[in-house]
Amino acid sequence: WEQALQIFREMAAGCVETDTITYNAAVSSCAKGRAWEQALHLLRDMANSNLERNRITYNAAISTCSWGGGWVLALHFFREMSEGTVEMDTITYSAAVSACEKGGAWEPALHLFREMASTHVERGTITYNAVFSAFQHAGKWVRVLQLLREMVESNVVRDSITYNAGISACGKGAAWWHALQLFLEMADVRVER
């Protein structure tokens, strides 16, 4: 991310015009490098330059905030996006749910997850796993089991992350019987441990 940011700065200082695409590349690089402060500076510069923010911009911004522990700021970008003309997708919702999960905010994570269903945005394994992790950290093992059943009914693929979060949540809730059942179910559905 540092090299990408350096190239971007050289472009901006030189004769090369920076646009939404170059800003998106720089913000995405910062997001992948967990350099959320630099990404936020780029987003502010982008706004000051009156450049259009598109779905890629917002998805990178939301993802970046999750690494900075800024789930509230991630939700700010999410709401800004929803109030504008930019269409949200599975990546948008998953990034926002992940930001809430990393910030220990399971209730907003669940709200976003439920909103996905009402807006007909696909909820895949990654999104379910992010919600499971939020519940796991909060000790909400019953909710994990409910969503796991929902995953089964909706034919969403379950993976080792799914089951590990479920087992951990049940372990934290002293629900050892359910933890054991999930462990055995992993073998039944052929998920690698």
Image (tube, helix red, strand yellow):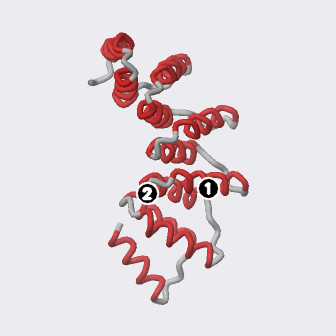
Where 85 sits versus 5, above or below? above
Image quarter (top left, top right, bottom left or bottom right) of the C terminus: top left
Residue drawn at x 61%, y 61% is 54
Under mark 2, the amino acid is Gly
- Tell me residue 187's x, y (percent): 30, 14
Which residue is more in the foreground, 74 or 170? Answer: 170
Compared to residue 173, the image places residue 177 above or below, namely above
Question: Is 44 positioned to the left or the right of 126 in the image?
Answer: right
- Left/right placement of residue 150 relative to residue 163 reads right
Q: Residues within 10 Å of mark 1 (few under 14, many from 20)?
A: some
Residue at screen point 55% across, 54% down: 74
Check disc 2 and report the residue beneath it: 68
Position of the N terminus by quadrant? bottom left
* The quarter of the displayed image where residue 80 is located: bottom right
Mark 2 near mark 1, Cβ–Cβ under 8 Å? Answer: no
- Is residue 189 shown to the viewer in this render? no
Where residue 73 sits, quadrant-wise, is: bottom right
Q: Which residue is labeled 1 in the image?
A: 76
Q: Earlier in the sequence, mark 2 or mark 1?
A: 2
Q: How many marks?
A: 2
Q: Say which residue appears at 72% left-offset and 57% top-offset.
A: 84
| Residue at x-position 38% and y-position 28% | 165
Which of the pair 99/72 is nearer the observer? 72
Mark 1 residue type:
His
Residue 119: image quadrant is top right
**Residue 58 in view here:** yes
**Disc 2 to disc 1, C-alpha distance:** 14 Å
Question: Relative to 136, does residue 84 appear above or below in the rendering?
Answer: below
Q: Position of residue 129 (x, y in %)?
A: 44, 33
Q: Nearer the viewer, residue 15 or 94?
A: 94
Mark 2: secondary structure: loop
Q: Is residue 61 above or below residue 191?
A: below
